[in-house]
Image: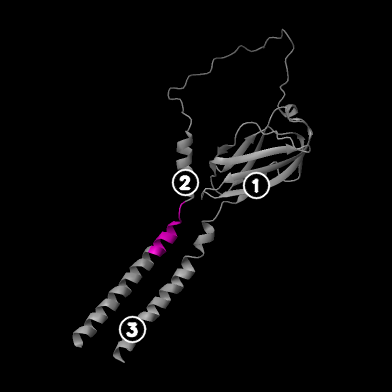
Amino acid sequence: MFRNNAVSPVNRIVGVLAVLVAVFLFPVVPAAAHDAVTGTNPEDGQSLDAVPEAIEVSFTATPLAMGSEIQIKDAAGMNWAEGGVEIDGNMAVQPVNPAAPAGEYTVTWRVVSSDSHPIDGSFSFTATEGAGASSSPNPEPAGAESSQPEQAAPESATPEQPQTDAAQAATGEGDAGVPLSFMIVLALLVIALSVVVAVVVRRRRLESDET
């Protein structure tokens, strides 16, 4: 009888720890799930005056460049994407071929989420003119000279160096880590479980000494 009464409080403590794990651990799992799309440029179903120079898909975290792909297909199924996907912060950017004609386009994207899982989706847009219409410069008449003299650009004493892809990747990895609150709760649960184990071992030693 004494042994059963001694173990009963321990069982209650273990049950409380199990409830704490369910309350604090499980809500964190969806938060660390795949990245979600926050917007696209153009937007789904948008009508543009001309085909844009690039397609942009924004996410809740920085996606991985490796394995990412964005296709820009017209009504005939021709893919007008040019080059590979570029990662700019939390945005995946796909340049468009300058010869892309006017018409309806379907964008199909597939990127690798910051948690290393692939995610995909699609959207569409229409353009009344081709890609060249949005970037054609206004030519000056032949032989025309500028009324203002050209000024040399001042040299910077400490020119900025572009951030490397490795540095950008390192910056994005910090945002995709495990939340600090989760680590604190997990540490507290481990400490509490260690205390319970120590109490059980001590009780059993006392019982064995009494017998």
Q: Earlier in the sequence, mark 2 or mark 1?
A: 1
Magenta stretch contains residue 181: yes
Other residues around mark 2 within 10 Å, as few (<14) / some (14–19) / many (≥20): some
Name the chief secondary structure element in magenta. helix
Q: Is residue 23 above or below residue 39?
A: below
Q: Earlier in the sequence, mark 3 or mark 2?
A: 3
Snapshot quadrant of residue 124? top right
Question: Circle 1 sits in a helix, a strand or a loop, which is it?
Answer: strand
Tell me residue 80's x, y (percent): 70, 33
Question: Circle 3 sits in a helix, a strand or a loop, which is it?
Answer: helix
Other residues around mark 1 within 10 Å, as few (<14) / some (14–19) / many (≥20): some
| Range drawn in magenta | 177-186
Separation (CA) of disc 3 from disc 2: 45 Å
Q: Which residue position is annotated with label 3?
A: 7
In the foreground, 111 or 176: 111
Q: Are marks 3 and 1 in contact (CB under 8 Å)?
A: no
- Quadrant for the C terminus, please: bottom left
Which mark, by number, is residue 1?
A: none
In the foreground, 208 or 38: 208
Amino acid type shown at disc 3: Val
Q: Are marks 3 and 2 in contact (CB under 8 Å)?
A: no
Q: Earlier in the sequence, mark 3 or mark 1?
A: 3
Residue at figure coordinates x 38%, y 68% from the top left: 189
Other residues around mark 3 within 10 Å, as few (<14) / some (14–19) / many (≥20): some
Separation (CA) of disc 3 from disc 1: 56 Å
Amino acid type shown at disc 2: Glu
Question: Circle 2 sits in a helix, a strand or a loop, which is it?
Answer: helix
Amino acid type shown at disc 1: Gly
Q: Which residue position is annotated with label 2?
A: 173
Tell me residue 94's x, y (percent): 63, 36
Q: Is residue 179 above or below residue 19?
A: above
Q: Which residue position is annotated with label 1?
A: 39
